[in-house]
Image (cartoon, rainbow, N blue to C red):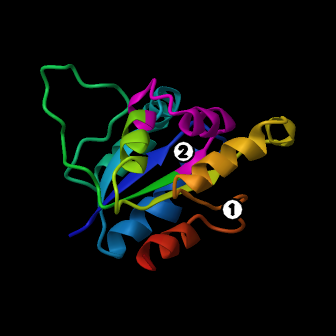
Amino acid sequence: MPTLGLVASACGGAEKRLLPEVAEPAVRRGWRLAVTFTPTLGRWMDATGAGARLAALTDLPVRHEPRLPTEPKPYPMPDAFLFVPASANSVVKLALGIADNQALTALNEAIGTPGVPVVVAPQAAAAPRAHPLWETHLAVLRSAGVRLVDPVEGPWTTLLDLLDAG
């Protein structure tokens, strides 16, 4: 069973949409979920109970805190990654190679691993998108082989089609 690295950051709707629009359909398609949240989204998901509902879909730990150096990695590199929703802050950090939380660490490692597809769906307001470097950051990610879906129209389930298609 292939493993999907499902990564999400703190954006409006994540606590309501991630489970029914991505996680449950991914499991139905045969993906094993390796879920990682940014620290802020991890707190949101825990507070709403959405984190526990998502954890029930996988045999792997749902992560939002880093492991100690003495602890082994909880699972090998996933076969593919989907980052939805990706906040403007996280997109910029990813483009710059900043890995200051568990979610960005996993994504940066994936981008550096040949043969691991990475799909990123930014969810950013007009003001961050108007920043003069926004398009530069997106271009950097594209040049690294990241597939960007910007903006996502309709249900997030459509993003799984990009991974299923290879």
Q: Which residue is mark 1?
A: 152
Q: Quadrant of the N terminus?
A: bottom left
| Residue 81 at x, y percent in the picture | 41, 56
Q: CA distance from mark 1 to mark 2?
A: 17 Å
- Circles 1 and 2, Cβ within 8 Å, touching? The answer is no
At 53% from the left edge and 56% from the top edge, which residue is drawn? 146
* The image quarter in which residue 15 lies: top right
Name which quarter of the figure residue 94 lies in.
Answer: top right
Q: Is residue 51 visible?
A: no
For the view shown, which residue lies furthest in the bottom direction?
165
Q: Is residue 42 above or below residue 83?
A: above
Q: How many marks?
A: 2
Q: Earlier in the sequence, mark 1 or mark 2?
A: 2
Q: Amino acid at mark 1?
A: Val
Q: Residue at x 50, y 44 (%)?
A: 8
Can you give x and y, in whole percent of width and height, for residue 127 in the image? 86, 36
Residue drawn at the location 68% of the way across and 62% of the way down? 152
Q: Could you say where residue 164 lies in the image, as x and y percent from the top left?
A: 42, 77
| Secondary structure under the numbered disc 1 in the rendered image | loop
